[in-house]
Amino acid sequence: MSSILFIALPLLFGFATPILNKFGKNAVVYISTYMQAFLLYLAFTLLSGNSSHIEIISIAPPLGISFVLNSISLLFVTLFTFMMTLFSLYYLSHRKTKPYKNETKFFILLNMLLAASIGLVLSSDIFNIYVFFEIAGISAYILSSYEKTPSALEAGLKYLITGAVASLFLVFAIVLIYMNLGSLNLALIAQGFETLAFNTKLLISVLLLIGFGFKVEIFPLNFWVVDVYEGSSTLVNSLFSSIVVKAYLFVFFHIVYLFLPSGEFSVFLIYLGALSMLVAEIAGLRQTNLKRLFAYSSLGQVALIFTAFAMQNVDAIQAALFIVIAHSIAKFIIFLALTNIEKEYKSMDITRLKELNSPFLRAVMLIAMLSLLGIPLFAGFIGKFLVLKSLAVSGFIGVLVLIIIASLLESVYYFKLAGFMFSKCEKGEVLKIDFVQKLVFIILSFSLLLIGLVPFFFSDFLHESATFMIDNTSYILNLVGGR
Amino acid sequence: MSLKRTLPTSVLSGFALSGAFILTVLQLLLQNVPKDIDRAGDALLSLNANEGVANAVTTVVVYFRGFDTLGEIAVLFIAALGIGLMLGENERCVIKAQSNFMLHTGAKLLFPIITLYGVYVMSYGHLSPGGGFQGGVIIASGVLLLLISHRDFEVPHSFIVWLETFAGVAYVLIGLIGLLTLDIFLGNFLPHDVSQMGLLLSGGIIPIIYIIVGIKVGSEMSAIVQSLIKRGDNV
Amino acid sequence: MFEYLNQAEVIKYIVTIGSMSLFFVGLFGLLTQKHFIKIFISIATMETSLFLFFIGNMFNKNFTAPIISEGFTDIAKMNDPVPHAMILTAIVIGMAVLALGVSMSIEYYKLTGNTEIDKMNEMRH
């Protein structure tokens, strides 16, 4: 089966919704869920098949656009479809009590977001990456301001303005690349990039860094993130932190490894990532709103992934992939649990956790928080440990110290949250959770525990994926040589 | 009377920051003027002859980079969806001026001509400059003319929705048919002889896709313009 | 003097300087203006300047348009079609995003009566 279906099916669904609406009021929701489950199945079959081939669109590369399927891109595709299917399952039971108005439009936007994130990860042409960048961006702007309350609209406006500025710088970089190198294919650009004058290389790299930096949430370009997380609905926050930012991270570092293989700016990027993590964790200490607190925690973890990706060796990238998987699943659990809490208590103040009277939710959130902290036996431990080990081996002791301080600060407020959750205060009413939602939580927590307890099961596959990210020559030969 | 205005610090710092950025960029750009190198466009120009289409820009937009065009259609679709979501439930703003006989008649006279011109630009996009986007926007500007000149004109919402649906589904289905028959998404599976170049029916799927793009762009721009006229009366 | 100005390199210099000045105007507006619509206009100005810069620099005045018709069949002497295709896509995408932004600010103004970006205080900071 072709990997184009990952993009074509959600687009077809989105365009055909007025026809699908004729089949009944709930038809769109169920058809969307089945389609996403089918895409998940397709991702698993592609993952277990033979790796590293190319799907051609219209004409063969390097003159045309193509999709490159290897372990690392398929890993991200599987992760995204997995998250989105579970999100749809959760929403199926969430809508019984609190459906969105205009649900069809909500599902169109969800599917467009999924298609765009998958397209970002698979594509091998820089202008195509820009088009998917815009599709993901515009779906996210609308999803963020979906409820049309003043705070949601404020979040949407801030997101839109920063996103438009980011795409400006990206267009500038693409324009300069085509003018100087004459091609839009990532492999041909990578071949020609070293021959450019140093000034032009510097200008293009800085423009790409600013353009992607807004979306990758790196200091000082992450001023918009926390307000957007607070203003959007909690359900949509889970998508932002689990799917969208991971796609942008992968594309940014894919481009960095292709264009600058000798790592000229990698030291700068490592320090930038460590600084972002420290700033995010310090700012998160004083928060009393749960959504803002977890937004700062997201910023910190994404900065850690950024630092790990920026180091130029395979072990660090393998560690980064571990953290990507662990963080996506853990934040997904947390934001979905926060949706339940918000539905019941109508407030996102941190003291609400004291009244939380649902042993299931407390257990699930505890598992997710322990994984984010990096406690052994949970999924986050192996990633953090491998990152610190790579930093020590490569000699970045200062960065190591910064990250350890930031992790300690993070643990301070996580333990405070855990203390609130398990405090002996007067509890509110029992929070009933639907069976389907419980199933979703159980699947997610089980995955976290699985990765935490038997990481060696996955480490070979992740090691192979990491080599694909660093190894330019096979990527370039694949594309320039044709199919 | 002296006009003494001190510029606030934000304006000065903004000026200095943007000025510094632009001067650096300008210096870098003027130092390294790009040389004449082999560009992808030259290779694509020679490939274009095989497709039997006269306008090379059309071939590049629709066929060689057809996936980008599909993505752009998706962006326009999502934008129209979002604008309809934000402003769709309001009533149409009422123009308070008295309706004018000349304006009415003139607009009604012009609208078919504008639409005809738009259809011409759309369908001859592969033979002369023009194409789906341009033709679609021309048709939407005709609709805008009618919206402004008549007080209660409204394109029926279901009409726009069905046009959009038909066009979008047709585009993706053509791509999928290419996948089934040629094993390449958006491959050119209809006959495209070079000898037909310059005739209206040439180039295989290329004029068909461009007309579909034109229909979609025209209907979506009309929907956007119509939603923007609905702001509610208290604004 | 006009022959000097008509040379290809000088035209490219003029185009570069002109479009970068336009970019400067847009960037200045983005950094200092507070009203939503003015910010959107600044972003639109910056996008337009980039398109000007690209098309102006890729244009060769001795070559013809990339359309094959009677009398113009020499492919080696045609301008490059790829920049035109890229800019078409970029124009439509930029316009779509700005239209969405304008509609969001209209709805926000309807709900709160606020049009300044630094007075958006719906959330505690």
Image: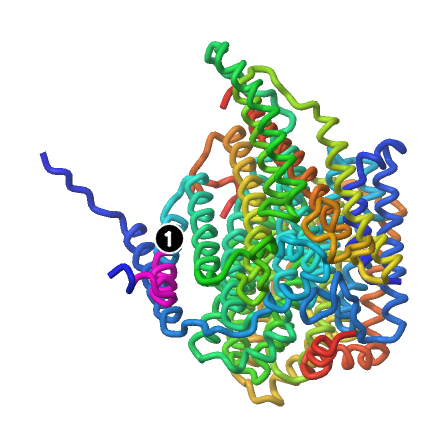
Of all residues shown, which one is farthest toward the front? C71
Q: Residue at x 56, y 27 (%)?
A: B144
Q: Amino acid at mark 1?
A: Leu
Find residue A202 and report its horizontal and vertical position in percent. 46, 75
Find residue C82 and report its horizontal and vertical position in percent. 58, 60
Asked if residue B41 can be seen in this view, the reply is yes
Of all residues shown, which one is farthest toward the left? B1
Find residue C66 and report its horizontal and vertical position in percent. 57, 57
> Label 1: chain?
C
> Alpha-carbon neighbours of circle 1 within 10 Å: few (<14), some, or many (≥20)?
many
Q: Residue at x 77, y 60 (%)?
A: A80
Judging by the rendered image, the residue that carries numbered circle 1 is: C22
**Compared with residue B222, is residue A424 higher up or lower down, i.e. above or below?**
below
Image quarter of the C terminus of chain A: bottom right
- Quarter occupied by residue B168: top right
- Quarter occupied by residue C111: top right
Q: Is residue C17 magenta?
A: yes
Asked if residue A355 can be seen in this view, the reply is no
Q: Is residue A370 left or right of residue B86?
A: right
Q: Is residue C60 left or right of residue B116?
A: left
Image quarter of the N terminus of chain A: bottom right
Magenta segment, principal secondary structure? Answer: helix
Judge by depth and name the residue closer to the eye, B95 or C61: C61
Q: Residue at x 51, y 65 (%)?
A: A173
Which stretch did the figure color magenta? C5-18
Judge by depth and name the residue closer to the eye, A116 or A381: A116
Q: Is residue C85 magenta?
A: no
Disc 1, SS: helix
- Quarter occupied by residue B141: top right
Q: Residue at x 72, y 50 (%)?
A: B206
